[in-house]
Image (cartoon, rainbow, N blue to C red):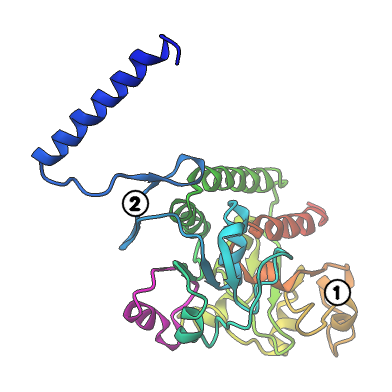
Amino acid sequence: MSRRRMPRLLAALLAGVVLALAGCATDDPGPEPTSGAGGAEYPVTVGTLTLDERPEKIVVLGPTATEMLFAIGAGDQVTAADDNSNYPADAPRTELSAFTPNAEAVAAKNPDLVVLTNDLNKIVDQLGQLKIPYYLAPAAGTLDDTYRQITDLGALTGHPTEAADLVTRMKGDVAKLVGDLPQRSAKLSYFYELGPEYYTATSSTFVGSLFTMVGLENIADPADADGSKGGYPQLAEEAIIAADPDLVFLADTKCCQQSAQTVSARKGWSGMTAVRDNRIVPLDDDIASRWGPRVVDLLRSIVDAVAKVPA
């Protein structure tokens, strides 16, 4: 052993003895914070949930939450996702259902964290009884809700920096998309179709707020002025035709195979401005129904459609 290393080793041994003696002479301070990925320290607390260690077996019940977790770099920690978590392609889809959640089936996956997007079947109470940590990320009402959930998941999974970076990118993309739109003397109107039965979403919903950001007027708003329909009224076909929207957005292209061709073929629709001027905009159902990172893609689709309409 070299003479240079000897003093260092002696110093380290002496320091260890001093610390050990000090520990015997004082009260136990409790466990030391541990570090997760990217230097994240545990325990970490979000709301009423405290995790002592980085979760390595996460079960997700909700495709939006799955997208968020993968987008912040926590995908490797997700060991099971619900049967609708179809994005990204390598998400570990299972038979678990987010619509009829079963606490025993979830517990069988031996999770150290469950991420939920609703409390159906009283799953929250059941997980609490089983002492399984959970984080509830319900449907967002605004973009700020989306940003908060991404930030929370980043903290819980040990990826706070990645989550912060994602939120910053999203905010920048949203600001640029909205800021690049040309000014108009009058607002364009639109109809947002959730299904061929003419269910739609008003401006009070999350997706409706995106259209409002772009400066569009929703023909469905009067149908739920008192909020009794929860922002999702069903319109009469005659009312849609009479409103004559400038644009029609289809969020039922996958579920119901709706397209510009099927809409144009509907009785009485051929004379509508949106149909006549080829302003029927097909959307990806999944992206349109989720409030995760790909909401920027949805907003881009809306902006692109509006930009094509002469100012």
Left or right: 146, with 30 as reference point: right
**Element type at marker 2?**
loop
- Closest to the observer: 26 or 295? 26
| Residue 57 image offset from top left, x and y in percent | 51, 65
**Residue 275, numbered circle:** 1
Figure check: 115 above or below 228: above
- Closest to the observer: 263 or 52? 52
Q: At 46% from the left edge and 55% from the top edge, which residue is drawn?
A: 148
Left or right: 158, with 307 as reference point: left
**Residue 96, numbered circle:** none
Which residues make up the magenta segment?
A: 116-135
The image quadrant of residue 124 is bottom left
Q: Earlier in the sequence, mark 1 or mark 2?
A: 2
Three-letter residue code for mark 1:
Val
Question: Residue farthest to the top?
Answer: 3
Three-letter residue code for mark 2:
Pro
Q: At 29% from the left edge and 44% from the top edge, which residue is drawn?
A: 32
Q: At 51% from the left edge and 41% from the top edge, which residue is drawn?
A: 38
**Element type at marker 1?**
helix
| Residue 41 image offset from top left, x and y in percent | 39, 44
Instruction: Tell me, yes or no, whether the highlighted magenta stretch contains residue 61.
Output: no
Residue linked to disc 2: 43
